[in-house]
């Protein structure tokens, strides 16, 4: 393998590792999100992790007012959700109306 190719591969792995490490995680615990609000840059994906023993879901209202379809989350599962639009996203669990948080894309 040439030195240049080797460098390109290493750079690629470093980029992937960096991208994976940067993924924010929000838990769902005791029927609450573990964050009230989260600031991210456009294009960030957030991992929502159900740490409860009941089913939750993730329902996102985008800054343009569009409601995304709710994603059902069984206990112990994770769901990765992408945030691309600038502005405030309301995130709720439709099963437990008190569960809500904001994802702010700057
Ligand atoms: Cu819930």
Image (cartoon, rainbow, N blue to C red):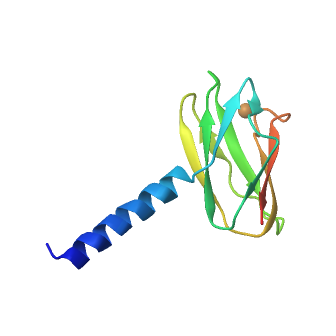
87 left or right of 21 in image: right
Where, quadrant-wise, is the N terminus in this rendering?
Answer: bottom left
Residue drawn where x is 73% and y is 48% of the image: 59
Residue 78, image quadrant: top right
User: Horizontal and vertical percent for residue 34?
Assistant: 74, 34
- The furthest residue to the left: 1
Residue drawn where x is 62% and y is 21% of the image: 53
Where, quadrant-wise, is the C terminus in this rendering?
Answer: bottom right
Residue drawn where x is 36% and y is 61% of the image: 13
- Taking 29 as reference, is 100 above or below it? below
Q: Closest to the observer: 54 or 84?
A: 84
90 left or right of 50 in image: right
- Taking 35 as reference, is 19 above or below it? below
User: Horizontal and vertical percent for residue 40?
Assistant: 71, 58
User: Horizontal and vertical percent for residue 22?
Assistant: 57, 54
Quadrant assignment for ligand 1: top right
User: Horizontal and vertical percent for residue 24?
Assistant: 62, 48
User: How many numbered marks have been drawn onto this rendered protein structure?
Assistant: 0
48 left or right of 64 in image: left
Residue 98, image quadrant: top right
Residue drawn where x is 57% and y is 45% of the image: 79
């Amino acid at each position: 393998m040439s030195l240049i190719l080797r460098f390109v591969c290493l750079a690629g792995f470093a980029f992937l590792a960096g991208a994976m490490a940067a993924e924010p995680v929000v838990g769902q615990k005791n029927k609450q999100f573990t964050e009230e609000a989260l600031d991210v840059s456009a294009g960030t994906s957030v991992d929502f992790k159900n740490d409860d023993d009941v089913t939750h879901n993730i329902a996102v209202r985008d800054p343009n007012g569009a409601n995304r379809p709710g994603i059902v989350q069984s206990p112990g599962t994770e769901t990765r959700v992408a945030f691309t639009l600038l502005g405030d996203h309301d995130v709720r669990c439709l099963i437990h109306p008190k569960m809500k948080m904001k994802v702010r894309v700057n």
